[in-house]
Protein backbone atom coordinates (compact mmCIF):
# COMPACT_ATOMS: atom_id res chain seq x y z
CA UNK A 1 0.00 0.00 0.00
CA UNK A 2 1.32 3.43 -0.92
CA UNK A 3 2.55 5.45 2.05
CA UNK A 4 1.00 8.62 0.62
CA UNK A 5 -2.54 7.20 0.68
CA UNK A 6 -5.03 8.10 3.36
CA UNK A 7 -6.00 4.76 4.85
CA UNK A 8 -9.54 4.02 5.97
CA UNK A 9 -8.80 1.00 8.15
CA UNK A 10 -11.57 -1.45 9.02
CA UNK A 11 -10.75 -4.02 11.69
CA UNK A 12 -12.96 -7.10 11.39
CA UNK A 13 -13.98 -9.24 8.43
CA UNK A 14 -17.53 -10.28 9.21
CA UNK A 15 -20.98 -8.71 8.77
CA UNK A 16 -20.12 -5.19 9.94
CA UNK A 17 -16.61 -4.99 8.50
CA UNK A 18 -17.33 -6.42 5.04
CA UNK A 19 -20.52 -4.40 4.63
CA UNK A 20 -18.76 -1.19 5.64
CA UNK A 21 -15.90 -1.86 3.20
CA UNK A 22 -18.30 -2.43 0.29
CA UNK A 23 -20.38 0.63 1.17
CA UNK A 24 -17.34 2.90 1.37
CA UNK A 25 -15.87 1.62 -1.90
CA UNK A 26 -19.20 2.00 -3.73
CA UNK A 27 -20.61 5.22 -2.29
CA UNK A 28 -18.06 7.16 -0.26
CA UNK A 29 -14.57 7.00 -1.80
CA UNK A 30 -15.82 7.70 -5.37
CA UNK A 31 -17.42 10.96 -4.16
CA UNK A 32 -14.34 12.33 -2.41
CA UNK A 33 -12.00 14.94 -3.90
CA UNK A 34 -8.81 13.23 -5.08
CA UNK A 35 -10.44 9.85 -4.58
CA UNK A 36 -7.26 8.04 -5.67
CA UNK A 37 -5.56 9.27 -2.49
CA UNK A 38 -7.78 7.04 -0.30
CA UNK A 39 -7.47 3.32 0.32
CA UNK A 40 -9.82 1.05 2.27
CA UNK A 41 -7.76 -1.45 4.30
CA UNK A 42 -9.64 -4.45 5.72
CA UNK A 43 -7.92 -6.30 8.58
CA UNK A 44 -9.21 -9.78 9.42
CA UNK A 45 -7.79 -12.68 11.42
CA UNK A 46 -9.40 -15.06 8.89
CA UNK A 47 -9.05 -14.82 5.13
CA UNK A 48 -12.54 -16.26 4.72
CA UNK A 49 -15.86 -14.94 5.97
CA UNK A 50 -18.13 -17.30 7.90
CA UNK A 51 -21.92 -17.25 8.18
CA UNK A 52 -21.68 -17.44 11.95
CA UNK A 53 -25.39 -17.99 12.69
CA UNK A 54 -25.08 -21.36 10.91
CA UNK A 55 -22.60 -22.77 13.46
CA UNK A 56 -25.17 -24.73 15.53
CA UNK A 57 -25.85 -26.92 12.48
CA UNK A 58 -22.48 -26.64 10.75
CA UNK A 59 -20.53 -27.93 13.74
CA UNK A 60 -22.17 -31.37 13.46
CA UNK A 61 -21.15 -32.32 9.92
CA UNK A 62 -19.92 -30.78 6.66
CA UNK A 63 -22.77 -32.62 4.93
CA UNK A 64 -25.51 -30.52 6.54
CA UNK A 65 -24.72 -27.20 4.81
CA UNK A 66 -22.99 -26.26 1.53
CA UNK A 67 -19.41 -25.47 2.46
CA UNK A 68 -18.83 -23.09 -0.46
CA UNK A 69 -21.55 -20.83 0.93
CA UNK A 70 -20.58 -21.29 4.58
CA UNK A 71 -16.98 -20.13 3.99
CA UNK A 72 -16.15 -17.53 1.31
CA UNK A 73 -12.75 -16.02 0.39
CA UNK A 74 -12.58 -12.37 1.45
CA UNK A 75 -9.95 -11.08 -1.04
CA UNK A 76 -11.91 -12.42 -4.04
CA UNK A 77 -14.97 -10.42 -2.98
CA UNK A 78 -13.06 -7.16 -3.52
CA UNK A 79 -11.49 -7.88 -6.92
CA UNK A 80 -14.34 -5.82 -8.43
CA UNK A 81 -12.94 -2.47 -7.22
CA UNK A 82 -10.25 -0.28 -8.87
CA UNK A 83 -6.71 -1.44 -8.22
CA UNK A 84 -5.18 0.37 -5.28
CA UNK A 85 -8.50 1.37 -3.72
CA UNK A 86 -8.60 -1.71 -1.48
CA UNK A 87 -6.09 -3.74 0.50
CA UNK A 88 -6.64 -6.87 2.57
CA UNK A 89 -4.47 -7.62 5.58
CA UNK A 90 -4.76 -11.13 7.03
CA UNK A 91 -3.88 -10.65 10.66
CA UNK A 92 -5.06 -9.85 14.18
CA UNK A 93 -5.14 -6.35 15.66
CA UNK A 94 -2.92 -6.33 18.75
CA UNK A 95 -2.77 -2.66 19.75
CA UNK A 96 -4.69 0.53 19.03
CA UNK A 97 -2.81 3.77 19.68
CA UNK A 98 -5.54 6.34 19.12
CA UNK A 99 -3.36 9.32 20.05
CA UNK A 100 -0.80 8.52 17.33
CA UNK A 101 -3.59 7.04 15.14
CA UNK A 102 -1.97 3.67 14.47
CA UNK A 103 -3.06 0.04 14.68
CA UNK A 104 -0.59 -2.81 15.16
CA UNK A 105 -1.48 -6.05 13.38
CA UNK A 106 0.08 -9.47 13.97
CA UNK A 107 0.25 -10.98 10.50
CA UNK A 108 -1.04 -14.50 9.87
CA UNK A 109 1.76 -15.19 7.39
CA UNK A 110 4.80 -16.79 8.94
CA UNK A 111 2.86 -18.19 11.85
CA UNK A 112 2.15 -14.81 13.40
CA UNK A 113 5.81 -13.98 14.02
CA UNK A 114 5.74 -10.51 12.47
CA UNK A 115 3.76 -7.36 13.24
CA UNK A 116 2.88 -4.41 11.02
CA UNK A 117 1.94 -0.97 12.32
CA UNK A 118 -0.57 0.88 10.15
CA UNK A 119 -1.30 4.61 10.17
CA UNK A 120 -4.99 5.33 9.75
CA UNK A 121 -6.78 8.43 8.50
CA UNK A 122 -10.12 6.94 9.52
CA UNK A 123 -10.81 3.81 11.55
CA UNK A 124 -13.82 1.50 11.82
CA UNK A 125 -13.81 -1.04 14.67
CA UNK A 126 -15.92 -4.04 13.64
CA UNK A 127 -14.18 -6.85 15.51
CA UNK A 128 -17.36 -8.44 16.86
CA UNK A 129 -17.37 -10.78 19.83
CA UNK A 130 -16.18 -14.27 20.73
CA UNK A 131 -18.27 -17.11 22.10
CA UNK A 132 -17.13 -19.14 25.15
CA UNK A 133 -17.34 -22.29 23.03
CA UNK A 134 -14.95 -22.23 20.05
CA UNK A 135 -17.51 -24.33 18.16
CA UNK A 136 -19.97 -21.47 17.78
CA UNK A 137 -18.04 -18.65 16.11
CA UNK A 138 -14.85 -17.71 14.32
CA UNK A 139 -12.90 -16.90 17.48
CA UNK A 140 -9.60 -17.18 15.60
CA UNK A 141 -9.15 -18.39 12.02
CA UNK A 142 -10.78 -21.02 9.82
CA UNK A 143 -8.17 -23.68 10.60
CA UNK A 144 -8.74 -23.30 14.34
CA UNK A 145 -12.52 -23.58 13.92
CA UNK A 146 -12.28 -26.65 11.69
CA UNK A 147 -9.90 -28.32 14.14
CA UNK A 148 -12.37 -27.82 16.99
CA UNK A 149 -15.27 -29.09 14.87
CA UNK A 150 -13.23 -32.18 13.95
CA UNK A 151 -12.48 -32.92 17.63
CA UNK A 152 -16.14 -32.55 18.55
CA UNK A 153 -17.37 -34.68 15.64
CA UNK A 154 -14.93 -37.48 16.48
CA UNK A 155 -16.43 -37.74 19.99
CA UNK A 156 -20.06 -37.45 18.91
CA UNK A 157 -20.88 -41.06 17.86
CA UNK A 158 -20.23 -42.56 21.30
CA UNK A 159 -21.71 -39.90 23.61
CA UNK A 160 -24.61 -40.65 25.92
CA UNK A 161 -25.02 -37.22 27.53
CA UNK A 162 -24.52 -33.59 26.51
CA UNK A 163 -24.91 -30.51 28.70
CA UNK A 164 -25.35 -27.06 27.14
CA UNK A 165 -25.05 -24.02 29.40
CA UNK A 166 -27.15 -21.11 28.21
CA UNK A 167 -30.78 -20.71 27.24
CA UNK A 168 -30.31 -18.05 24.57
CA UNK A 169 -30.55 -18.66 20.81
CA UNK A 170 -27.08 -20.25 20.51
CA UNK A 171 -27.77 -22.76 23.28
CA UNK A 172 -31.29 -23.58 22.15
CA UNK A 173 -30.36 -23.90 18.46
CA UNK A 174 -27.38 -26.11 19.27
CA UNK A 175 -29.52 -28.32 21.49
CA UNK A 176 -32.20 -28.59 18.82
CA UNK A 177 -29.73 -29.50 16.07
CA UNK A 178 -27.90 -32.07 18.18
CA UNK A 179 -31.17 -33.48 19.51
CA UNK A 180 -32.65 -34.08 16.07
CA UNK A 181 -29.37 -35.37 14.60
CA UNK A 182 -28.67 -37.83 17.44
CA UNK A 183 -32.19 -38.73 18.63
CA UNK A 184 -34.58 -38.03 15.77
CA UNK A 185 -37.91 -36.36 16.46
CA UNK A 186 -41.07 -37.54 18.19
CA UNK A 187 -44.34 -37.66 16.30
CA UNK A 188 -46.14 -34.37 15.72
CA UNK A 189 -48.66 -34.97 18.49
CA UNK A 190 -46.22 -36.41 21.05
CA UNK A 191 -45.27 -34.07 23.88
CA UNK A 192 -41.75 -35.47 24.11
CA UNK A 193 -39.42 -38.07 22.68
CA UNK A 194 -39.51 -41.33 24.60
CA UNK A 195 -36.14 -42.93 25.44
CA UNK A 196 -33.76 -40.63 23.52
CA UNK A 197 -30.41 -42.24 22.66
CA UNK A 198 -28.50 -39.21 23.98
CA UNK A 199 -29.62 -37.24 27.04
CA UNK A 200 -29.25 -33.56 26.16
CA UNK A 201 -29.74 -30.95 28.87
CA UNK A 202 -29.94 -27.16 28.56
CA UNK A 203 -29.13 -25.28 31.78
CA UNK A 204 -30.38 -21.69 31.96
CA UNK A 205 -30.23 -19.09 34.74
CA UNK A 206 -33.53 -17.57 33.63
CA UNK A 207 -37.10 -18.51 34.45
CA UNK A 208 -37.51 -19.30 30.74
CA UNK A 209 -35.27 -19.99 27.77
CA UNK A 210 -35.01 -17.34 25.04
CA UNK A 211 -35.45 -14.27 27.28
CA UNK A 212 -35.67 -11.87 24.32
CA UNK A 213 -38.97 -13.50 23.33
CA UNK A 214 -42.27 -13.53 25.19
CA UNK A 215 -42.85 -16.46 27.61
CA UNK A 216 -45.49 -18.08 25.37
CA UNK A 217 -42.96 -18.39 22.55
CA UNK A 218 -40.33 -19.72 24.96
CA UNK A 219 -42.80 -22.40 26.10
CA UNK A 220 -43.32 -23.47 22.50
CA UNK A 221 -39.55 -23.70 22.04
CA UNK A 222 -39.29 -25.88 25.13
CA UNK A 223 -41.98 -28.17 23.69
CA UNK A 224 -40.06 -28.51 20.40
CA UNK A 225 -36.87 -29.29 22.33
CA UNK A 226 -38.62 -32.04 24.28
CA UNK A 227 -39.63 -33.61 20.97
CA UNK A 228 -35.94 -34.15 20.11
CA UNK A 229 -34.97 -35.42 23.55
CA UNK A 230 -33.78 -32.19 25.17
CA UNK A 231 -34.50 -31.39 28.83
CA UNK A 232 -34.37 -27.82 30.18
CA UNK A 233 -33.24 -26.98 33.71
CA UNK A 234 -34.33 -23.44 34.60
CA UNK A 235 -33.18 -20.94 37.23
CA UNK A 236 -29.89 -22.78 37.55
CA UNK A 237 -26.47 -21.32 36.97
CA UNK A 238 -23.28 -23.22 36.24
CA UNK A 239 -20.81 -22.56 39.05
CA UNK A 240 -17.89 -24.75 38.01
CA UNK A 241 -16.79 -27.22 35.34
CA UNK A 242 -14.12 -29.88 35.80
CA UNK A 243 -11.70 -30.51 34.32
CA UNK A 244 -10.93 -26.83 33.75
CA UNK A 245 -11.07 -26.09 30.03
CA UNK A 246 -13.70 -28.69 29.23
CA UNK A 247 -15.91 -27.26 26.48
CA UNK A 248 -13.53 -24.38 25.80
CA UNK A 249 -9.94 -25.61 25.36
CA UNK A 250 -11.01 -29.24 24.94
CA UNK A 251 -14.36 -29.52 23.18
CA UNK A 252 -14.39 -33.32 23.36
CA UNK A 253 -13.70 -33.73 27.10
CA UNK A 254 -16.04 -35.43 29.54
CA UNK A 255 -17.08 -32.96 32.23
CA UNK A 256 -18.58 -32.64 35.67
CA UNK A 257 -20.81 -29.58 35.82
CA UNK A 258 -21.53 -28.12 39.26
CA UNK A 259 -24.54 -25.83 39.64
CA UNK A 260 -24.85 -22.98 42.16
CA UNK A 261 -27.18 -25.06 44.35
CA UNK A 262 -24.47 -27.73 44.66
CA UNK A 263 -26.04 -30.24 42.29
CA UNK A 264 -23.62 -31.95 39.93
CA UNK A 265 -24.26 -33.21 36.40
CA UNK A 266 -22.07 -35.57 34.39
CA UNK A 267 -21.63 -35.03 30.67
CA UNK A 268 -19.75 -36.77 27.88
CA UNK A 269 -19.70 -33.38 26.13
CA UNK A 270 -20.12 -29.88 27.55
CA UNK A 271 -20.93 -26.81 25.45
CA UNK A 272 -20.87 -23.35 27.11
CA UNK A 273 -23.23 -21.04 25.21
CA UNK A 274 -23.61 -18.22 27.74
CA UNK A 275 -23.05 -14.80 26.25
CA UNK A 276 -20.17 -13.40 24.24
CA UNK A 277 -16.98 -11.46 24.97
CA UNK A 278 -16.34 -8.32 22.87
CA UNK A 279 -13.13 -8.55 20.85
CA UNK A 280 -11.54 -5.43 22.32
CA UNK A 281 -8.35 -6.87 23.83
CA UNK A 282 -6.28 -4.74 21.45
CA UNK A 283 -7.66 -1.54 23.01
CA UNK A 284 -5.32 -0.75 25.90
CA UNK A 285 -7.03 2.52 26.87
CA UNK A 286 -10.05 1.23 28.78
CA UNK A 287 -11.61 4.71 28.80
CA UNK A 288 -12.71 3.89 25.24
CA UNK A 289 -14.82 0.99 26.54
CA UNK A 290 -18.07 0.71 28.49
CA UNK A 291 -18.48 -1.55 31.51
CA UNK A 292 -19.27 -4.71 29.54
CA UNK A 293 -16.13 -4.35 27.42
CA UNK A 294 -17.72 -3.00 24.24
CA UNK A 295 -16.47 0.14 22.52
CA UNK A 296 -18.08 3.32 23.88
CA UNK A 297 -19.88 4.39 20.71
CA UNK A 298 -22.15 7.36 20.08
CA UNK A 299 -25.56 5.67 19.82
CA UNK A 300 -26.71 8.01 17.06
CA UNK A 301 -23.67 8.81 14.91
CA UNK A 302 -21.69 5.56 15.51
CA UNK A 303 -18.56 7.61 16.18
CA UNK A 304 -16.17 6.71 18.98
CA UNK A 305 -16.03 10.27 20.24
CA UNK A 306 -13.29 9.69 22.83
CA UNK A 307 -10.89 8.22 20.25
CA UNK A 308 -10.38 11.37 18.20
CA UNK A 309 -11.64 12.35 14.75
CA UNK A 310 -12.91 9.82 12.21
CA UNK A 311 -13.08 6.75 14.47
CA UNK A 312 -16.22 4.59 14.43
CA UNK A 313 -17.56 1.26 15.68
CA UNK A 314 -20.29 -1.05 14.44
CA UNK A 315 -21.79 -4.44 15.22
CA UNK A 316 -21.45 -6.62 18.31
CA UNK A 317 -18.32 -4.76 19.46
CA UNK A 318 -20.13 -1.39 19.62
CA UNK A 319 -22.25 -0.18 22.54
CA UNK A 320 -24.92 1.28 20.24
CA UNK A 321 -27.39 -1.62 20.36
CA UNK A 322 -27.83 -5.16 21.63
CA UNK A 323 -25.73 -7.68 19.72
CA UNK A 324 -27.83 -8.91 16.78
CA UNK A 325 -27.01 -9.36 13.10
CA UNK A 326 -30.26 -7.79 11.92
CA UNK A 327 -29.39 -4.53 13.71
CA UNK A 328 -26.16 -4.15 11.74
CA UNK A 329 -27.90 -3.72 8.39
CA UNK A 330 -29.74 -0.43 9.09
CA UNK A 331 -26.59 0.94 10.73
CA UNK A 332 -24.39 0.55 7.61
CA UNK A 333 -25.91 3.45 5.58
CA UNK A 334 -25.81 5.68 8.68
CA UNK A 335 -22.17 4.86 9.28
CA UNK A 336 -21.33 5.35 5.60
CA UNK A 337 -23.06 8.73 5.45
CA UNK A 338 -21.31 10.02 8.56
CA UNK A 339 -17.90 8.78 7.41
CA UNK A 340 -18.46 10.51 4.06
CA UNK A 341 -19.45 13.73 5.80
CA UNK A 342 -16.36 13.65 8.02
CA UNK A 343 -14.03 12.91 5.09
CA UNK A 344 -15.53 15.69 2.98
CA UNK A 345 -15.14 18.20 5.82
CA UNK A 346 -11.54 17.06 6.33
CA UNK A 347 -10.96 17.58 2.61
CA UNK A 348 -11.97 21.22 2.94
CA UNK A 349 -15.65 21.15 2.02
CA UNK A 350 -17.88 23.64 3.81
CA UNK A 351 -20.21 22.38 6.51
CA UNK A 352 -23.35 23.59 4.75
CA UNK A 353 -22.44 21.71 1.57
CA UNK A 354 -22.11 18.27 3.16
CA UNK A 355 -25.41 18.09 5.02
CA UNK A 356 -26.09 17.00 8.57
CA UNK A 357 -25.16 13.85 10.43
CA UNK A 358 -27.43 10.88 9.94
CA UNK A 359 -28.77 9.23 13.08
CA UNK A 360 -29.11 5.57 14.00
CA UNK A 361 -31.90 4.38 16.28
CA UNK A 362 -32.06 0.83 17.59
CA UNK A 363 -35.23 -1.08 16.72
CA UNK A 364 -36.19 -2.54 20.11
CA UNK A 365 -39.23 -4.46 18.91
CA UNK A 366 -39.36 -8.19 19.65
CA UNK A 367 -37.35 -9.72 16.80
CA UNK A 368 -35.61 -13.06 16.98
CA UNK A 369 -35.85 -16.33 15.04
CA UNK A 370 -34.71 -19.60 16.56
CA UNK A 371 -34.76 -22.83 14.51
CA UNK A 372 -35.07 -26.02 16.56
CA UNK A 373 -33.84 -28.77 14.30
CA UNK A 374 -34.49 -28.84 10.58
CA UNK A 375 -38.27 -28.60 10.60
CA UNK A 376 -39.34 -26.50 13.59
CA UNK A 377 -38.68 -23.06 14.98
CA UNK A 378 -40.03 -20.19 17.05
CA UNK A 379 -39.68 -16.46 16.76
CA UNK A 380 -41.06 -13.00 16.23
CA UNK A 381 -40.40 -10.16 13.82
CA UNK A 382 -41.12 -6.49 14.56
CA UNK A 383 -43.26 -7.56 17.52
CA UNK A 384 -45.35 -10.15 15.67
CA UNK A 385 -45.13 -13.83 16.54
CA UNK A 386 -44.11 -16.03 13.60
CA UNK A 387 -45.47 -19.52 12.94
CA UNK A 388 -42.98 -22.38 12.93
CA UNK A 389 -43.20 -22.68 9.14
CA UNK A 390 -42.13 -19.06 8.65
CA UNK A 391 -39.12 -19.46 10.95
CA UNK A 392 -38.10 -22.52 8.93
CA UNK A 393 -38.64 -20.70 5.62
CA UNK A 394 -36.67 -17.59 6.60
CA UNK A 395 -33.89 -19.04 8.75
CA UNK A 396 -34.25 -22.71 9.57
CA UNK A 397 -33.67 -24.09 6.04
CA UNK A 398 -30.03 -23.07 5.92
CA UNK A 399 -29.41 -20.57 8.75
CA UNK A 400 -29.32 -17.49 6.50
CA UNK A 401 -26.95 -18.90 3.88
CA UNK A 402 -29.48 -17.86 1.25
CA UNK A 403 -28.83 -14.22 2.18
CA UNK A 404 -25.04 -14.18 2.28
CA UNK A 405 -24.33 -14.22 -1.48
CA UNK A 406 -25.55 -10.66 -1.99
CA UNK A 407 -24.21 -9.54 1.37
CA UNK A 408 -20.63 -10.78 1.02
CA UNK A 409 -20.39 -9.66 -2.64
CA UNK A 410 -21.65 -6.17 -1.83
CA UNK A 411 -24.71 -6.41 -4.07
CA UNK A 412 -26.85 -5.70 -1.02
CA UNK A 413 -25.21 -2.27 -0.89
CA UNK A 414 -25.48 -1.53 -4.61
CA UNK A 415 -27.60 1.57 -3.93
CA UNK A 416 -26.71 4.37 -1.57
CA UNK A 417 -29.45 4.54 1.03
Image: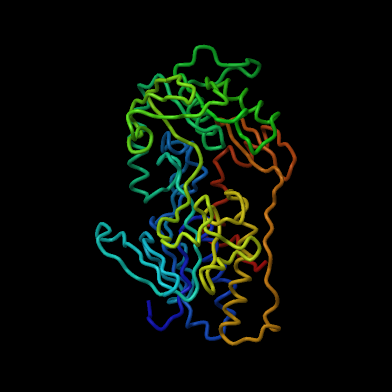
Q: Nearer the viewer, residue 148 or 232?
A: 232
Q: Position of residue 205 (x, y in %)?
A: 55, 30
Drawn side of residue 415 relative to residue 149, left or right: right
Seen from this angle, which residue lies furthest right?
Answer: 384
Q: Quadrant of the N terminus?
A: bottom left
Location of residue 112 by image quarter:
bottom left
Q: Quadrant of the C terminus?
A: bottom right
Q: Position of residue 42 (x, y in %)?
A: 44, 65
Q: Position of residue 257 (x, y in %)?
A: 41, 25
Image position of 291 with respect to 260: above or below: below
Residue at position x 55%, y 70% in the image:
24
Q: Nearer the viewer, residue 91 or 80?
A: 91
Drawn side of residue 147 relative to residue 322, left or right: left
Location of residue 210 by image quarter:
top right
Q: Position of residue 376 (x, y in %)?
A: 61, 30
Residue at position x 60%, y 64% in the image:
302
Q: Disc count in the image?
A: 0
Drawn side of residue 378 relative to residue 49, left or right: right
Drawn side of residue 410 relative to residue 11, left or right: right
Coloring applied to the structure: rainbow
Image position of 282 with respect to 394: above or below: below
Seen from this angle, which residue lies furthest top?
Answer: 195
Image position of 341 with respect to 224: above or below: below
Amino acid sequence: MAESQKRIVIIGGSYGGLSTAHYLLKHVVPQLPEKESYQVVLVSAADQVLCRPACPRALISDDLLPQDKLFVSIPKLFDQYPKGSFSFLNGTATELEHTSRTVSVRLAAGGGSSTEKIDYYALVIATGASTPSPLLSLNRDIEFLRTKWAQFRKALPTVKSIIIAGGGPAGVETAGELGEYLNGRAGRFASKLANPRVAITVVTAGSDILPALRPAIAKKAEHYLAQVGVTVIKQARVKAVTPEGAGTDDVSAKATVTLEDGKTLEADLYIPATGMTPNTGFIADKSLLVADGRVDTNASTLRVDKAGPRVYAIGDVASTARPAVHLIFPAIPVLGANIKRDLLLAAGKEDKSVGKDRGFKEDTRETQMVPIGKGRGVGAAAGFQLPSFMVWLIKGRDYWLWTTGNLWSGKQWAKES
